């Protein structure tokens, strides 16, 4: 059973997802900075740069959005030309265009946008121009994959594309078709608004953080939802009644004496999970360092001495570390390139065991993750799709003294 614990304050909503009491996902959203990912804008092309094969689009934000040529070409790879055309043959300055945000703005970079439009629903993802049907890889039964593939092909029209989500497994055709009808109506509404407004303009905003998690991870009949705000309870129940018309467990209003995150042990788990140094059972440690596009994780035996031989001790440590790293990557919502410095192992068999353990854990993650393998220096490389701001940005801030480096300048001679 899962529990969604939601804390609402004046300026921020924080959401924690617990599985059997263990914190597995955390996210936060400021009221004045609701995420842009998934939202649609009518934008105006400001610059077209053939040398970068990209364009910059004004969508009404502080920074112009970045639109790469791949996000302008047809979303179906088989429909794309073998040789990419120059982007200045596809777009021109001043042109108005409907775009969808696929990556949040970060630092000095604007949002990344695309014309490969998607609208996620409860059972599927709707793509108005993709012209194919896909089925979630997490659905293992070939008979069910074939059923959903055939159902999608029967339901889609003309240029439409559909991706059948994991939760659509064993769902009746009527439920899936009803979801598609809602998404089609939503898409038509976006297009109608685009015809009426001048660029730059917001056409459609993605769901709030609580609604997204209800849609993507919540089982309305089994899981629990606890919120410490009466208004948020009403909003969640309204959304659930639309998403699950056949019934759902009532949303619980938390009114205890302790803050909700403290009452359910969330704060304690957050403090540990977002530390730079994480101690594992038995005394081994992880050192976690993050840069803008790269995360480095160092595994140390530290006080762990639990094996009959050095190779056994090292392998046990690495297996423990792999399980915890897979869990923390999801919790911290770490994205980009991830390099893990496991302790050196002599046997290929043991290295395969460690990779297998890590693959099993990250397989539970909804975000696309790819383990590339071992480098010649014995480091394990992996990547994880980066879409939204890291959860770390909402749980801490850079040190005012060192700016996040962990070091401060030495005093010059003569200074007090």
Image (cartoon, rainbow, N blue to C red):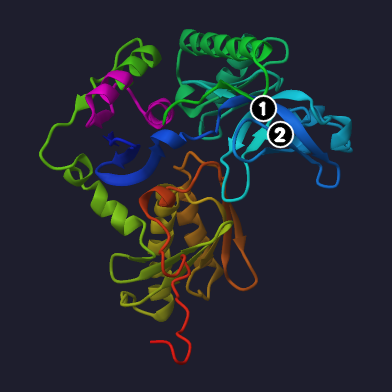
Quadrant of res 149:
top right
Q: Give left or right: position of 171 versus 255.
A: right
* Residue drawn at x 36%, y 70% as measured from the top left: 285
Return the x and y of residue 266 as percentages of the image width and height. Answer: 25, 47
Return the x and y of residue 368 as percentages of the image width and height. Answer: 55, 42
Return the x and y of residue 60 as percentages of the image width and height. Answer: 62, 31
Of residue 38 and residue 330, the one placed in the foreground of this image is: 38
The image's mark for residue 99 is 1
- Which is more N-terminal, label 2 or label 1? 2
Mark 1 near mark 2, Cβ–Cβ under 8 Å? Answer: yes
Q: Where is the C terminus found, in terms of image quarters?
A: bottom left
Secondary element type, mark 1? strand
Q: Is residue 191 above or below residue 379?
A: above
Q: Give left or right: position of 395 versus 354.
A: left
State the extent of the magenta-drawn residues as a range: 209-235
Tell me if mark 1 has few (under 14), some (14-19) or many (20+) residues whose alpha carbon lies within 10 angstroms of its own. Answer: many
Return the x and y of residue 223 as percentages of the image width and height. Answer: 28, 29
The image's mark for residue 57 is 2
């Amino acid at each position: 059973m899962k529990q969604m614990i939601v804390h609402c304050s004046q300026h921020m909503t924080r959401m924690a997802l617990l599985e059997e009491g263990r914190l597995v996902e955390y996210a936060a959203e400021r009221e004045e900075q609701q995420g842009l990912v998934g939202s649609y804008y009518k934008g105006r092309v400001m610059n077209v740069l053939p040398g970068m094969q990209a364009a910059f689009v004004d969508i009404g934000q502080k920074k112009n959005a970045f639109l790469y040529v791949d996000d302008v070409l047809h979303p179906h790879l088989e429909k794309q030309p073998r040789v990419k055309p120059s982007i200045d043959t596809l777009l021109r300055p001043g042109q108005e265009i409907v775009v969808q945000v696929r990556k949040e703005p970060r630092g000095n970079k604007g949002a990344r946008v695309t014309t490969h439009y998607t609208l996620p629903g409860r059972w599927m993802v709707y793509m108005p121009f993709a012209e194919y049907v896909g089925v979630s890889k997490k659905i293992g039964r070939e008979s069910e994959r074939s059923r959903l593939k055939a159902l999608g092909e029967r339901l889609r029209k003309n240029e439409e594309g559909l991706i059948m989500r994991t939760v659509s497994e064993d769902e009746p055709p009527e439920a899936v078709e009803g979801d598609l009808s809602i998404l089609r109506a939503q898409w038509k509404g976006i297009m109608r608004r685009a015809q009426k407004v001048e660029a730059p303009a917001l056409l459609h905003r993605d769901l709030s953080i609580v609604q997204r998690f209800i849609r993507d991870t919540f089982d309305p009949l089994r899981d629990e939802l606890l919120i410490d705000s009466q208004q948020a309870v009403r909003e969640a129940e309204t959304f659930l009644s639309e998403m699950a018309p056949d019934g759902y467990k009532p949303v619980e209003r938390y009114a205890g004496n302790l803050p909700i995150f403290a009452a359910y042990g969330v704060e304690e788990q957050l403090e540990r999970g977002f530390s730079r140094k994480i101690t594992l059972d038995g005394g081994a440690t992880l050192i976690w360092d993050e840069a803008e596009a790269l995360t480095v994780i160092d595994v140390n035996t530290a006080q762990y001495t639990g094996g009959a031989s050095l190779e056994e001790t090292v392998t046990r440590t690495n297996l423990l570390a792999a399980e915890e790293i897979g869990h923390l990557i999801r919790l911290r919502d770490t994205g980009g390139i991830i390099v893990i410095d496991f302790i050196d192992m002599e046997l290929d068999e043991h290295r395969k065991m460690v990779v297998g353990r890590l693959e099993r854990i990250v397989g539970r993650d909804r975000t696309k993750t790819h383990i590339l393998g071992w480098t010649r220096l014995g480091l394990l490389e992996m990547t994880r799709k980066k879409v939204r701001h890291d959860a770390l940005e909402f749980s801490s801030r850079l040190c005012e003294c060192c700016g996040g480096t962990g070091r401060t300048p030495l005093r010059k001679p003569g200074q007090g």
